[in-house]
Image (cartoon, rainbow, N blue to C red):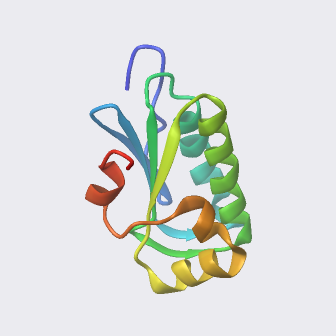
Amino acid sequence: MNDDHVTPPPTAYARTYRLARTTVVELAGEIDLGSAHGVHPHLDAAALTPVAPLVVFNLGPLEFIDCYGLTLLVRARRRVLDRGGRTAMVCAHPPTLRLLRMTGLDLLFRPVRTLDEALRPPG
């Protein structure tokens, strides 16, 4: 990423990469309490990235997420916003979208269907 920031190594549940000045955290598989150890380092590192004005949570490869996993995303989002950044979410998986709607988090994250959409400037 840059000299001040170390990207965590990929896990079965998360990988982090850069696209220009954007940090993308891609989540995969099943995100719950049991997989948190493979997700935490990626979300924490992305939230603390000093040069990334945009952090995208890409849930494209995600198969399942529970309320604990959603809590991790809400926490990471808050930390990004507290540092003056912004977030976007990619999600087209119907069960995950349904969970986001049921919890009201669809209004917070405003998921889009593709990474290209998430990378567009706001407005």
Residue appearing at x 65%, y 51% in the figure? 37
Residue positioned most to the front: 123
Relative image position of residue 38 (x, y in whole percent): 58, 52
Between 60 and 89, which is closer to the camera in this rendering? 89
Q: Who's the residue at 43% across and 30% down the image?
A: 52
Q: Residue at 31% of width from left, 65% of height from top?
A: 114
The percent coordinates of residue 80 (x first, y second) are 59, 37
Q: How many marks?
A: 0
The image position of residue 81, as x and y in percent, is 61, 38
Front in this rendered view, residue 86 or 26: 86
Q: Is residue 20 left or right of residue 2?
A: left
Q: Is residue 122 above or below residue 64?
A: above
Which quadrant of the figure has residue 34?
Answer: bottom right
Pick the residue in front: 33 or 93: 93
Relative height, residue 50 to residue 54 (above, below): above
Residue 78 place in picture, x, y as percent: 67, 43
Q: Quadrant of residue 26?
A: bottom left
Residue 68: name its quadrant: bottom right
Name the residue furthest top: 3
Q: Quadrant of the N terminus?
A: top left
Q: Residue at x 36, y 41 (%)?
A: 17
Q: Is residue 113 left or right of residue 71?
A: left
Placement of 97 over or under 82, stated as above or below: below
